[in-house]
Amino acid sequence: MVVAGVGSMIVQVADRPLISRISGLAAAGLYGNCYKLGIFMMLLVGMFDQAWKPFVLERAERPDVDALIARVLTYFTVAAAGTFLAVAFFVTAAVTAPLFLGKPLFHPAYWDGLVIVPVVTLGYLFNGLYFVMLAPLMIDKRTGAVGAATWVGAAVNLGVNLVAIPRHGMMGAAWATCAAYAVMAATVWLLARATRAVPYEWGRLGAVGVWTAALWLVGARTGLAVRALLICAYPAGLWFSGFLKAEELAELRSMLSARSSRAAPEPPVGD
C-alpha cells in the first residue's frame, strides 16, 4: 500500500510545483487558493471513504456484496452529482458577493482563477467513484492492482500537466487532475473484473451523468435564479424519469410513512 500511497500523492500534489515552474509563482498561488473551493466535494468524498471501507469489508463474505457495491456506486453518484451542480452553480457568487462587512470572501485578485472550481469538484467526484470501485480489490486483497491503478493515474496526471499547463495554464492543471482520477476509477474497475464481476448499474449511472451534464451546460449560461430552478430540476428529473426502482420507491414510501407517524401528535387520552 506504500506504493499506492506514493502514486496517490503524486496525483494530489504534482500540479502545484509544475504550475509554479511553468507559469510562475503568481499563477501557482492563484491556482492553490481557488483549488481549495473544491472542499465541499472533498469533504463529502473523504467522509464517505472513511465510512465505506470498514462498511464494505465487514460485509466481504456476504453473497450479495457485489450487488451492494454496485448499488452504493449508484447512490453515491446521485449524491455527488447533486453536490457538483450546487458547487458549480453557486460557489462563484458566494465568494464574490460583498456579504462579509461589505467585502467579498475572495479578493478580486483571485476571481480569474474561479473557473477551475467546477473542474476541481468534478475531479473529486471521480475520486469518489474510484473509492467505491476499489472495494473488490480490497476484498480480494489485491494490493498490487491498487498500486498499479494509482501509478497509472500518476502517469496520466504528470503527462497531461506537462502538455496542458503551457497551453491552458491553471485550467490545464485542473483537467489533468480530473483526468487522473477518472482514469484511476476506470483502471480499478478493469483490474477488478479479472476476479469479481460487480453488476454496476451502467444504465442508471449514464442517466445521472447525462442529466447532470445537461443541467451544467444550461446553468453555465444563466443567472442565479435559473440555476436555483435547475438544482430543483435535478432530483425532480430523476424522480419523474423512472430512475428509482420499484423496491426503492417502496422503501422510500415506508421511510416517509414511518417519519410522518413519529411526527404526528398522539391523540388525547380519554377519561
Image (spheres, rainbow, N blue to C red):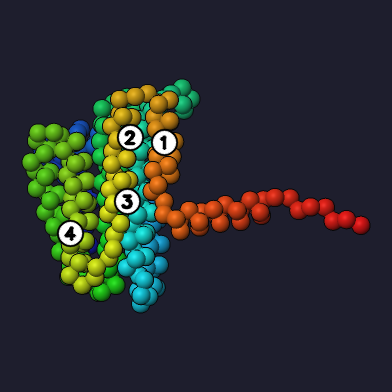
- Dot 3 or dot 4, earlier in sequence: 4
Q: Quadrant of residue 133?
A: bottom left
- Dot 4 or dot 1, earlier in sequence: 4
- Dot 2 or dot 4, earlier in sequence: 4
| Residue sitting at x 39%, y 73% | 58
Task: Say which residue label 1 marks.
Answer: 233
In the image, what residue type sits under mark 3? Arg
Question: Quick one: 258 or 9, which is closer to the camera?
Answer: 258
In the image, what residue type sits under mark 2? Leu
Task: Say which residue label 2 marks.
Answer: 215
Q: Secondary structure at mark 3?
A: helix
Q: CA distance from mark 2 to mark 3?
A: 17 Å
* Circles 2 and 4 in contact, beta carbons < 8 Å: no
* Circles 3 and 4 in contact, beta carbons < 8 Å: no
Q: CA distance from mark 3 to mark 1?
A: 17 Å
* Circles 2 and 1 in contact, beta carbons < 8 Å: yes
Q: Which of the labelled discs sits on residue 204, or is there none?
A: 3
Residue sitting at the far right: 271
Using a 10 Å C-alpha cutoff, classify the residue at mark 2 as few (fewer than 14 neighbours), some (14 to 19) or many (20 or more): some
Using a 10 Å C-alpha cutoff, classify the residue at mark 3 as few (fewer than 14 neighbours), some (14 to 19) or many (20 or more): some
Task: Say which residue label 4 marks.
Answer: 187
Q: Secondary structure at mark 4?
A: helix
Report whether residue 106 is seen: no
Using a 10 Å C-alpha cutoff, classify the residue at mark 1 as few (fewer than 14 neighbours), some (14 to 19) or many (20 or more): some
Using a 10 Å C-alpha cutoff, classify the residue at mark 4 as few (fewer than 14 neighbours), some (14 to 19) or many (20 or more): many
| Residue sitting at x 26%, y 27% | 112
Q: Nearer the viewer, mark 2 or mark 3?
A: 3
Q: CA distance from mark 4 to mark 1?
A: 33 Å
